[in-house]
Amino acid sequence: MPPAPIHPQANADDTILDAVIVGGGIGGIVMLAEGVAQGTTRILLLERSGQLGGIWARLPAWQTIQNHPLDFCLQGFTTRKSVWCAGDVLHFLADYVRVQRLEPFIRSGHEVCRCLWLDDAGCWSLTVAAGSGPPATIRCRRLILCTGRHAEPIVPRIDTDQSVPIVHSSAWRCPEEAAGKRVVVIGGGASALDLCMLVLAAQKHDGGRGRLHWVLRRAKHFSGAGVRRLWPVTVLQLTLGTTASTDLLNRVLDTYARIVFWWHGLSSWLPVERLELRQEQYIPGRGALLKQAGRIDRRPGAEVESVRRGRVILTDGTHLDGIDLILLGTGYAPPGPIDGVGDLGDLALKTFATGQHLGRLFLVGERLLDTTGAAPIAYHAFSRVFWTLIRDEAALEEVTRRAEEMEIPRSNLNHLDLLNRVATLGSETRRRRGPLGRLLPWATWRAEMLWTTLVEALLFKTTVLFADRRLGRGLSLDDPPNEPTAITTGPRVPD
C-alpha cells in the first residue's frame, strides 16, 4: 500500500505538496490513480461535495451514460451490460478507488475557494473550506483542475404563471409519475431522449390517458441502434488512424443512422446537416424512441414561449392544452469560476502547454473532451502521458506544439484522435524496441492497441489501453457492490 500523503499545514515549506487535484469525478480520480502509480504520493484530491463521482453522484439513478460501458472498463474491469446508468458509474469509481488504494489521498467535503500563485515560494496557495470550521490553507507546486464540463443544470427562463410544474432532468427522481399525464419534454440532447423514453414507459399501461409532447429547438444525431454495436468504431479508428478514421467514420455513422431512421419512416427526425464528430456528440442507442414514434407529438424547431393555466404556448404558434408536467432535458453548464483562476471554460487544454502558469496549472482538456463521448478512455490516456511528461521538459515542449494544434477553432478531437496524438510521447515512445518501433512509434502503438482491443473486447468484455498496467483480470462491475456506492473519504484537512 502506498504511503499516506503529507497532511499540509499553512506556512510550512516542508509540507508543500507536489500536486493538488480539484474535482472528484471520473477525470480527477483517474488522474490521481495514475499519479500515485507513477510515484507521486505528496498529492491530494479535493472534492467539494460529500461524495465522489462528480456529476454522476448528483444525477437520478435512471440517467444513462452516453457511450459504451466498455469505455469505463479500464485495466481489467469487466462488464456484460450493454447500457450503464448513473449507479453503475458510481460502482465503477468506488471499486477503482478501492483497488487502486486511493482513499488516503482523497478529501471529500472540501471546496477550493481561492487560488493564489506565490512567486517567492514557487507554489500555489489554496484557501479550502470544509464544513463549518475555519478555512484551511494548502500549498502545492502544481494545480490540476478536473472540475468537469457538465456541472450545473441549465434551466432556461420560461414565462410561466406556475400552473404547471417545471422539473429539470437532474431533479426528476420518480418517472412513474408521468403515467396518465400530459407531459412536455424540452430539449434535443441525450437527457431529453432519455426523458422521452421514460415517459413512454410510464404511460405504456395507462389506458391512453397520458400524452407526450417533445419540443426541441434543434435535432441531434443519435444512432437509434444498440450501444453494443459501436465498439467496431474503435477498431476502425485504430486501424486507419486519426484523420482518415474521423472522416470515414463521419460518413459511416451518418449513413448507418440514416438507413435506420429511413427503415422506421423517420428520416425527418435527423438533422439536415451531416454528422461531424469533431463538433458534436454522436448519441448511441435510444432505438425505443423509433419504435414508439407514433406515441410522440414531436415539435422540432420550436421553443416554449409561455405557460398559462395549463396551456403551453410555443414560438411556432402552437398551443398545447391541459399540460400536467414540463420536463427539461436542457443539459448542464460548466462550473463557475474559482477566485484566482478565472473562467474555467477559457483555460481548456492550452493551459497545459502555454501561458504564465506553464508547468503550474493544468485543466484536463475540458473543451477537448466535451464532445468525445468516451471521456474515461481519454482521461486514462491523458493522465498516463501527463505524469510522464510533467518531469520531462523536452517532451513538454512537444506537447506544447501539439496542444496548440488541438486548439485550432472547431477542430475538437474525439478520444482516439487524442490517443494517437499523445500516446507516443515521453516514455511511451522511448520504451519502443526494434527499428519499426523507433521509426514509426505511432504505428506500432496503434497495432498493439488494435490487438489488445480485439482480444479484450471480444473475449473478456474489457478495454486495456496500456497492457503493461493491468490491475487484474475479472474485476466484474456487474455484481452488486458490497457496500453502498457513495464514496466519502478522508478527514478534514487540518488548519
Image (cartoon, rainbow, N blue to C red):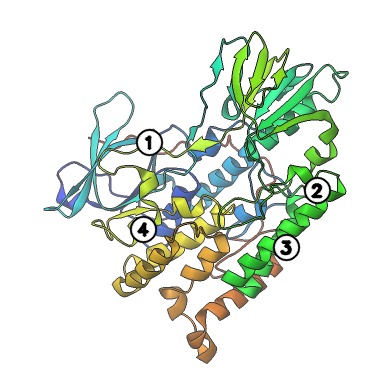
| C-alpha gap between disc 2 and disc 1 | 39 Å
Foreground tag (4 vs 3): 3
Amino acid type of the residue tagged 2 in the rendering: Phe
State which quarter of the image contains the N terminus: bottom left
Query: Up-down: is 27 above or below 213?
Result: below
Residue 350 shows which numbered tag? 4
Sequence-first tag of 4 and 3: 3
State left or right for residue 151 relative to residue 217: left
Q: Sort mark 2 into few (<14), some (14-19) or many (20+) by Cα contacts within 10 Å.
A: many
Amino acid type of the residue tagged 4 in the rendering: Lys
Q: Quadrant of residue 130?
A: top left
Q: Which residue is mark 1?
A: 336
At 64% from the left edge and 32% from the top edge, which residue is drawn? 61
Q: Tell me the element at label 1.
A: loop
At 33% from the left edge and 56% from the top edge, which residue is drawn? 351
Q: Tell me the element at label 3.
A: helix
Foreground tag (2 vs 1): 2
Amino acid type of the residue tagged 1 in the rendering: Gly
